[in-house]
Image (cartoon, rainbow, N blue to C red):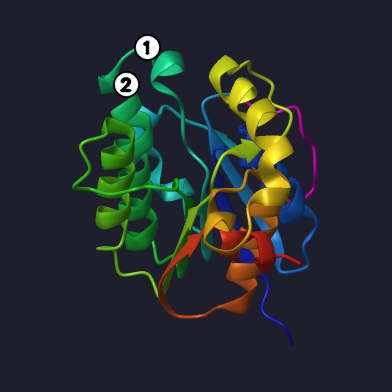
Amino acid sequence: MQKVRTALIAGASGLVGGHLLSLLLKSDRYSQVISVGRHELPVIHPKLDQQVINFDKMKDYAADMVADDVFCCLGTTIKKAGSKENFYKVDYTYVAQLAEITARKGAIQFLVVSAMGADAGSMIFYNKVKGEMERDVQQQPFNAIHIFRPSLLLGERDEKRTGEDLASKVMKPLCGLMIGPLEKYKPIEAITVARAMLAAAKAEKPGKHIHPSDDIAHMGS
């Protein structure tokens, strides 16, 4: 008899997270899907348990954050966050705390969306924050850790991100030229990243895995 599992997703209101939540709810792998977020989502499903939390006090909600597979799609921009400090809090602190809490609660796998260029030693603030997050997540005792480093994400957002919209318009016509070593820079659909995350969870491959964008593009197919 196949073991039914519980999934926990943080960031289900975002571009990748929205697609991933839909996939998790449809998957026979999970009997329950816990979504943690600042606001309730307009989604009703018998498997869905929505937990509205204050991320600044995440440890207060630890008792409700028990799952087998944890999917983290938290992320913002400096413009939306309002400052570098707030950006750091969302993209590093919240993610690192989620990993620490769920590991302590017995989660088996942790799967997180990072970014291409993540490097804790980078002089670029964005890349440095993502790199520090990756470094510290990998210190947690999960059986498997999967870090996804997508290139520019494509898809319809609820929020307007002018810079990313402009970049996608410029990059899309060039996609056909991005082959070989350039393939990892090719823009990638958010649904493709979501499918790759679910595929990695299903594979149950132990260890620490970093997935560049060109690998992500083929994982969920």
Magenta residues?
A: 40-48
Tell me the residue that label 2 is attached to.
86
The tag on residue 47 is none
What residue is rendered at 68% in x and 41% in y? 174
Instruction: Indicate yes or no whether the magenta region holds residue 41.
Output: yes
* Residue 43 picture location, percent across and down: 77, 34
Please indicate whether residue 18 sits to the left or right of residue 146 in the image.
right
* Residue 212 picture location, percent across and down: 49, 59
| Label 1 close to label 2 by CB (< 8 Å) | yes
Q: Is residue 189 visible?
A: no
The foreground one among 98 and 189 is: 189
Can you say which quadrant of the picture contains the N terminus? bottom right
Please indicate whether residue 135 sits to the left or right of residue 156 in the image.
left
Q: In the picture, residue 26 is in which quadrant?
A: bottom right
* Residue 149 picture location, percent across and down: 48, 52
Kind of residue at badge 1: Gly
